[in-house]
Image (cartoon, helix red, strand yellow):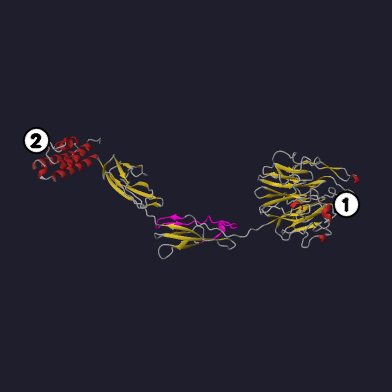
Amino acid sequence: MKMQNAFRGLALGLLLLGTGTGNAHADEIVVWGVDDQGMVSNAPQGSDFTKISSCFNSAIALREDGSIAVWGADNFGQVTNAPTETGFIDISSGNGTCYALRADGSILAWGANNFGQVTNVPAGTGHTSVVAGMGNAFALRADGSIVGWGLDRVTTDARRGIGTALQITSIPAGTGYTQIVANGWAAYALRADGSVVGWGADPYLGYDDYRLLKDIPNAAGFTTISSSPYGEAAYALTPDGSITHWGRNNFGQKFFAPGQPGSAGVNPGASANGYTAIAGGRFWACALAADGSIVQWGYEWGAKPPGNDFTAIATYYGGGIALKSVVPPNTAPTAVAGDDQSIRAGDIVELDGSASFDDNTAAELLSYSWTFSAFPGTTAPDLMGGSTATPTFLADLAGTYVLDLVVTDDAGLPSVVDQVEISSQNLAPTAVALVDFELAVVGTTSYFDGSGSSDPELDEITFSWEITAAPLGSTATLVDADTAMPSLTTDMEGTYEVTLTVSDSLGPGAPASVEFVATTPQNYAEMKIMEACDLIQALSPEQVTSRGNQNAMCKYLKNATKDLQRGNTSKAIDDLNKALERTDGCALRGSPDGNGAGRDWVVDCDAQHGIYNALKLAIDLLQLPQ
């Protein structure tokens, strides 16, 4: 504890992993060492952290959503003034000052501002990382150039003839740098080729183990570098995972480093190679092995945490911080059997369980098991694809089908049952199709009526009419074919068939059809003349003035028919008018005409009505343009 008290107030921690501070997934925070300012007891809870950084006796962590957690000392407002926004992508903690990088590359600073660390933050966007020093900070721009701000002159040991370290004005020019770290006397940058450049001062040039600049390794290929704002040593990691050290070694920071001479002091189990990250402190350092375990050397502030599931490391005064991978307990998947369906008996039913999900198994990798728990009849239908997400079956009987779905994840953990109900109780609607006349004249419009159609459950129905038969060459079309009462204008002689299909929400019912015949005006007139003659011949003696007049009226009609067959339409119309005059009293004057030249030969109004209408229609047809 004497060493601990002697160095209380010195900042020791900065995480550096690859070219940034953190890992690619969210983990929980583990802290070991001295609980000064609540560094251990107040560590943030949760398993959504991606990066950590620390200095002296405060630390900062980045969550998965880009929000920030700060704990430890609050003497400069590091904790109380921490931002509440989200979307940050990088963090760094210095001597009482915290820094955060937004997604747009702009930098936010809060905390100590005695050297302009907060007020002199470079404006604008486009920065890719930010690193805290002792009273200053540095950032990389998108082109790999370096910008710095804050304390420029650091007084070293004047007794040994050492003056100042210009850490800001001596920043190297150029682009292509990939990482920056800094301590109280020097700063370092990693070039794209993996070589290291440094600037600042060597505080104790007379000591071979204290040369922070002179002993920078003259080599390339390093993958990451590390130091600490209050540190007196620096480290670099090679591609094979071995560690190179330069700087002070007063507590074995160097000689106890893994893989270097004097490594007997390192914790057992560490290998010489295979390290993936370094975190350098002032009197100690730690490394993250490829298997996820932690190795520490130098002054030991506390026992390192056991295990090999760590993903990132950092140091602070009096201890270390790590991110520990948390594997959540496997939970059962959730089966989603889909929405209940209403169908018709005889339909092919398509099931869909693709909305089922699991916390760690993709939906397409889940195992599916469908079974019938209820069905009409005595035998369950054949289920096609019952071990897939989308099986099918034929609902051959009316009734209700209930299916159970269980999904199993890749660890063999099954879900609870989810059910879907398929009902075929809903009956199809009934179509009723009518036409105004079964015989029509070519060129006239026929009207259809489907308003008598109905649905057993009183569901809303829709109408769909179509011409299913027509004379060869006809181009007639239906008007308002999606309504209850469409129409059609005939264009050729012959038989027409029009079919109505009505549907409810489940689909169509059985269609209904209606036929009618279209003919020429003359043919239609001849049929009406024959109809009138049949009516006259069927009259009783009481309904006519005499049997002779009854025969005379039929003779007029037969003559009209002969006239039409000879092509003498006007003569036929004259003959029809002569017959019409003998049966028009009721229609024109309300009663049969009495004695006189224009006397009606049919004296019964009911009998007159049918004969008059047939003859009048025949005359009107013959007067149409041919």
Neighbourhood count class around disc 1 (C-alpha, 10 Å): few under 14, some 14–19, many 20 upward: some
Judged left or right of residue 9, residue 616 is left
**Percent from the top left, x then y, of residue 424?**
40, 57
Which of marks 2 and 1 precedes in the sequence? 1
- SS of the residue at dot 1? helix
User: Magenta segment: does it hold 446?
Assistant: no
Q: Answer whether residue 496 is visible to the viewer in this image.
A: no
- The type of residue carrying mark 2 is Asn
Q: Nearer the viewer, residue 268 or 558?
A: 268
Label 2 packing within 10 angstroms: few (<14), some (14-19), many (20+): few
> Magenta: predominant secondary structure element?
loop
Q: Position of residue 306 (x, y in %)?
A: 73, 61
Question: Secondary structure under badge 2?
Answer: loop
**Residue found at the very far top of the displayed protein:** 597
Residue denoted by label 2: 595
Residue plotted at (69% across, 52% down): 44
From this view, report whether residue 222 is shown above or below residue 574.
below
**Quadrant location, the C terminus:** top left
**Residue that badge 1 annotates:** 208
Residues drawn in magenta = 340-369
Query: Disc 1 versus disc 2: distance between alpha carbons?
Result: 154 Å
Relative image position of residue 563 (x, y in whole percent): 17, 38
